[in-house]
Image: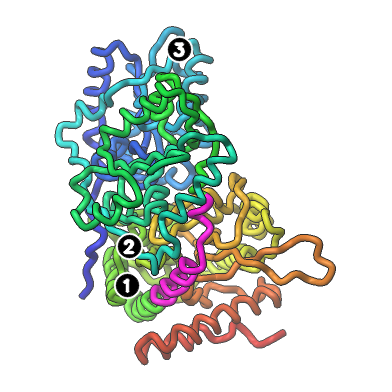
Amino acid sequence: MFEARFQSFEERGERGASAPRVAALRTELAQRGIDGFIVPRADRYQNEYVPPCAERLAWLTGFTGSAGLAIVLADRAAIFVDGRYQVQVGEEVDAAVFAIEHLVERPPAAWIEAQLKRGQKLGYSPWLHTVDGAEQLANACAAAGASLIPLADNPVDLIWSDRPPPPLGAVVLHDLRYAGEEAQQKIARVRAEMSKVSADALVVSDPHAVCWLFNIRGSDIPHTPVVLGFALLPREGRPTLYVDARKLTNETRRKLEPIAGLGAPVDFERDLAALGSEHRAVRLDPTACPDAIARLIADNGGKILRGADPIALMKAVKNATEIAGARAAHLRDGAAVVRFLAWFEREAPSGRLSEVEAVEALESFRRDTGLLKDVSFPTIAGAGADGAIVHYRVTRASNRRIAPGELFLIDSGGQYEDGTTDITRTLAVGAPTAEFRQRFTLVLKGHIAIARAVFPDGATGAQLDTLARQFLWRAGLDFDHGTGHGVGSYLSVHEGPARISKLGTAPLRRGMILSNEPGYYRTGGYGIRIENLVLVREAAAPPGAEKPLNEFETLTLAPIDRRLVEPAMMTDEEVAWLDAYHAHVRNVLAPLVDAPTQRWLIAVTAPLSPPR
């Protein structure tokens, strides 16, 4: 009945192949006189999602998550992942080959200090580590009396005989009706920021920033419409965009050339070295820029100006056109999600529906809009214990039936030219247990606390994160991921610099779009997460207010499963929020769906309970 076109369900990990591959890597390292090598989950652009040719960590270890790092020494090896992947890594990685470490609780630097011996050499690829990251690793090596050695080529690539070729997705122009601002205006704004720090040039190393700056999009990375390329923006003169010429049609080239010079990737390294030899002051973001770029400038006599890429904040603060596009995308996406939810409630109780079939159905409903360009990430669809794996990705091998009496967690999103969506709903299959209702309501209360928050302009995500956890904390519970991440405008579903997290130190600015997604996960049992996207906007100032205030506008439109809510645990204000949200969802989506779905929607968005 349904099919998935934008995502597959094939097993990507190769757990059984890791031992011989690690052995081959050790042989290669020994021939070079190197005692170990670091293999991050990264590409030359420090992307979260990487093309197949950059999936070195997955190829070597079997781990297919989107964040992690491995270190291979002659006599031992370890893989480091954060709390999202603790279950997944145990299933995908051969523990006889790799010790499994927590990326936060025992980070790689601490492991290096403990494991390296004096005089040893630990190799790394400077293109795959940020400037700050490489310095941390170098300091850890120094503390152990060892050395961090940059390698000109990557030894993993030499032993990876069937490595896929680099992607060649076409560069396409992002129309002004979606971008809302001409590229020339963006360039002028960035240059104004550069002048404040006396930078002669800015390195734009993040492809998302490159795409935003020049109003282009691409298809080099699955589910994220970016062009893999770099840019250099001088304080005066034309900027240069460095992309493979095979990605450019004659028409695209004609429209880009008045804005920027077009250079080949090989020209980028030459031009970086030239900036150094001319003793230019070059701005780059040490938390995101590859170490290799800084080396090419500094080793040739240039001056590095460290600081945040000004484009990151500009990109995160959506303009009026992008905000209108986000609202339109969420309206369209909400109608598709509601069609799926109504279908799921009809089909799931039979016990015949599988996780894969649910993913295929949801993607199909989104494709029916006629405007879906891609899913914004592989759909997370976990029934029962699979829902406790935060970033679970169903495969044909892991696929299971969704049984009555379980919870089903589905986290998904769409890429539309006018906006990017991301939504999670946790659904009861049949009658929920008292435990399900109690834990779900604790999560919901945290979700509502974020949704209703009013905060001073300039407050950070770290200041708000506790609001989402307070009710779980009181019950001795928590979740091991951030409460929210930034979201791009037809770009990455995960966007900085702002986030709602204990690590979220960037101020929340009006126009930013973030997720609101607290959760709870009982390993081996079930998972709960409730996610909406929210827009930071100005809040009405109460009498006597001394500071400008902000609040969130909820963009996501889809019912929250009322069967999982325990009204007795809710305050009057929380019930009022949920009822008002459901009334809004009902009013705006009912005209967009078919009659049977409309009847279902009206029923599931009825008030939670009579006023108290």
Instruction: Identify which residue, 184 or 398, lies in the foreground.
Output: 184
The correct choice, above or below, for 243 with respect to 583 in the image is above
Q: What residue type is labelled 2?
A: Val
Please give the range of residues in magenta.
313-334
Q: Mark 1 and 2 residues: CB-CB less than 8 Å, in contact?
A: yes
Q: How crowded is mark 3: few (under 14 residues within 10 Å), some or many (20 or more)?
A: many
> Which is nearer the N-term, disc 1 or disc 2?
1
Q: Quadrant of the N terminus?
A: bottom left
Q: Which amino acid does label 3 sit on?
A: Ala
> Which is nearer the N-term, disc 2 or disc 3?
3
Q: Name the residue under label 1.
A: 366
The correct choice, above or below, for 345 with respect to 513 in the image is below
Residue 48 position by quadrant: top left
User: Residues under labels 1 and 2: Cα distance?
Assistant: 9 Å
Residue at image position (48%, 87%) is 603
The correct choice, above or below, for 575 with respect to 226 in the image is below
Q: Name the residue under label 3.
A: 146
Residue at image position (35%, 88%) is 594
Q: Where is residue 115 in the image (x, y as percent from the top left)?
A: 45, 18
Q: Mark 2 points at which residue?
A: 375
> Which residue occupies the extreme left position in the image?
162
Residue at image position (22%, 68%) is 3
Label 3: which secondary element: loop
Prevailing SS of the magenta stretch: helix
